[in-house]
Image: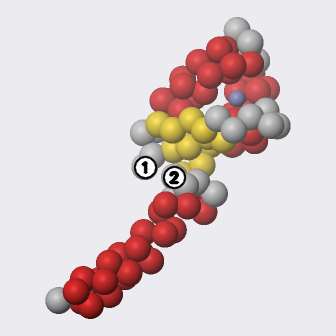
Amino acid sequence: MAKVLKCGDLMPGCNFVVEGKDVPEVVAKGAEHAKTAHGMTSIPPDVAAKVQAAINEVAEAKSWRTPVHRCLPIEFSWLRQCSGRIA
Ligand SMILES: [Zn+2]
């Protein structure tokens, strides 16, 4: 199950979203982002625990992610209607 981590949950104001196929991958990418974007050269254990807690399943996070996902069924039904009208 793919995982996502919103950096904004830990760093208010940051819009960065980390995605990975599993928790270790998200943690690794998150650590890299924390280093490059927030100047955190190491992740203290308490922050690491918060990172673990902030990681969500992609499915749960769907609603805030990209609106495209929510629009797809609407677009599909529109396309069906559209092609039906053309035919
Ligand atoms: Zn960030």
Circles 2 and 1 in contact, beta carbons < 8 Å: yes
Q: What label does residue 1 carry, if any?
A: 1
Q: Image quarter for residue 86?
A: bottom left
**First reached walking from the N terminus: tag 2 or tag 1:** 1
Residue at 74%, 34% in the rendered image: 14
Mark 2 to mark 1: distance in Å?
Answer: 8 Å
- Residue 28 is left or right of residue 74, and the answer is right
Q: Which mark is residue 85?
A: none
Q: From the viewer's perspective, is 76 left or right of 41?
A: left
Ligand 1: image quarter? top right
Q: How many marks?
A: 2
Question: 86 and 31: which one is in front?
Answer: 86
How is this picture coloured?
Answer: secondary structure
Tell me which amino acid carries mark 2. Answer: Val
**What residue is rendered at 76% in x and 27% in y?**
47
Q: Residue furthest left?
A: 87
Question: Residue 56: percent from the left, percent from the top?
Answer: 60, 49
Residue at 47 percent across and 63 percent down: it is 69
Q: Is residue 7 visible?
A: yes
Question: Neighbour class for label 2 at 10 Å: few (<14), some, many (≥20)?
Answer: some
Given residues 37 and 30, the one toward you in this image is: 37
Give the residue type that dot 1 points to: Met
Looking at the image, is mark 2 or mark 1 nearer the viewer?
Answer: 2
SS assignment at label 1: loop
Q: Position of residue 84 (x, y in %)?
A: 24, 89
| CB at disc 1 and ligand 1 closer than 8 Å | no
Residue extending farthest to the front is: 86
Q: Which residue is mark 2?
A: 58
**Residue 43 seen in the figure:** no
Q: Quadrant of residue 62?
A: bottom right
